[in-house]
Amino acid sequence: MNNKDQDLIYSKPQANVADFRFDAQVVEVFPDMIKRSVPGYNTIIDTIGQLSKRYAVEKTNIYDLGCSLGAASLAMRRSITAQDCKIIAIDNSDAMVERCKIHVNAFKADTPCVVKQGDILQEDMQNASMVVLNFTLQFIAPQMRQQLINKIYKSLVPGGIFILSEKIYDADPTCKDLLNDLHHDFKRANGYSELEIAQKRTAIENVMRPDHLSTHIERLHQAGFSHATPWFQCFNFFSLVAIK
């Protein structure tokens, strides 16, 4: 990997650390950033592909909300066997959408994938057999999160599946500190310095507001989901499935 692709954004001291944004600078190094920052990310993406093979239904839509560079969309395109499905990938970052289109267009598959810029709170969603919300809800204003989950539930056909992946926090302060420490050890093991860890934490603390796991489950039940279970957790990162 050359320096252009390596996440060095916070490697030098910054007098004023700005709030984190998914801009062109982040897009350039995003795969490296995710690999070195999110434990289990590849497992989550691979499993989303497996779930799409099982749950994608003929003549329905599959939504990838907050698609970033399209990792989940590409995993689903490789795996879907149902006919006449369409993947709709949405992100509000211009830079992410443009790069995602390049990635998606480079991979030929029977299942079409439409990549579009938009606000997932405003986008119309319907006739979905599968919806993916991968590390995106944590960037949505807390007061709008139930509204989005309600919309996702209504968009799903009976038997449709919702995959939610997020960073969470533990309500027990001792456990919360332990999980945070383990995550920081993970970053150190992947080559991040103490300066990088500290400055990234400062940059993201005002824009990413994680929930407790019980809050996620409560939202899902309030929206109408009767089946919901976590299937993956590593430190303070988890993924769950909910079925309509």
Image (cartoon, grey):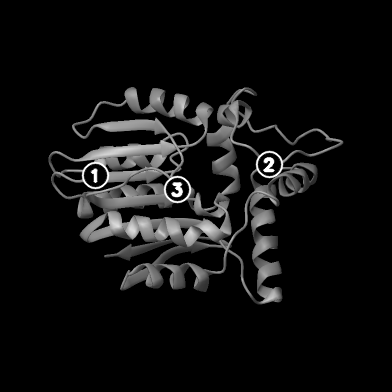
Q: Does residue 190 appear left or right of residue 48 in this picture? A: right
Residue at image mark 2? 191
User: What residue is shown at x 25% (from left), y 50% (from top)?
Assistant: 128
User: What residue is shown at x 59% (from left), y 39% (from top)?
Assistant: 33
In-front residue for pair 196/116: 116
Marks 3 and 2 in Cβ contact (< 8 Å): no
Outermost residue to the right: 15
Where is residue 47 shown, x and y percent of the image?
A: 35, 52
Q: Earlier in the sequence, mark 3 or mark 2?
A: 3
Identified by mark 2, the residue type is: Gly
Identified by mark 3, the residue type is: Leu
Q: Does residue 189 appear left or right of residue 166 in this picture? A: right
Residue 61: mark? 1
Residue at image mark 3? 121
What is the C-alpha distance between the residues marked 3 and 2?
36 Å
Where is residue 144 shown, x and y percent of the image?
A: 51, 57
What is the C-alpha distance between the residues marked 1 and 2?
40 Å
Identified by mark 1, the residue type is: Asn
Crowd band around label 3 with a 10 angstrom C-alpha radius: few (<14), some (14–19), many (20+):
some
Give the SS element for disc 2.
Answer: loop
Q: Earlier in the sequence, mark 1 or mark 3?
A: 1
Where is residue 233 shown, x and y percent of the image?
A: 49, 63
- Quadrant the C terminus occupies: bottom left
Crowd band around label 2 with a 10 angstrom C-alpha radius: few (<14), some (14–19), many (20+):
few
Vertical comparison of 105 with 164: above or below: above
The answer to which image quadrant residue 116 occupies is: top left
User: What residue is shown at x 46% (from left), y 24% (from top)?
Assistant: 98
In-front residue for pair 35/229: 229
Residue 213: mark? none
Where is residue 214 shown, x and y percent of the image?
A: 51, 73
- Which tag is nearer the camera, tag 3 or tag 2? 3
Crowd band around label 1 with a 10 angstrom C-alpha radius: few (<14), some (14–19), many (20+):
many
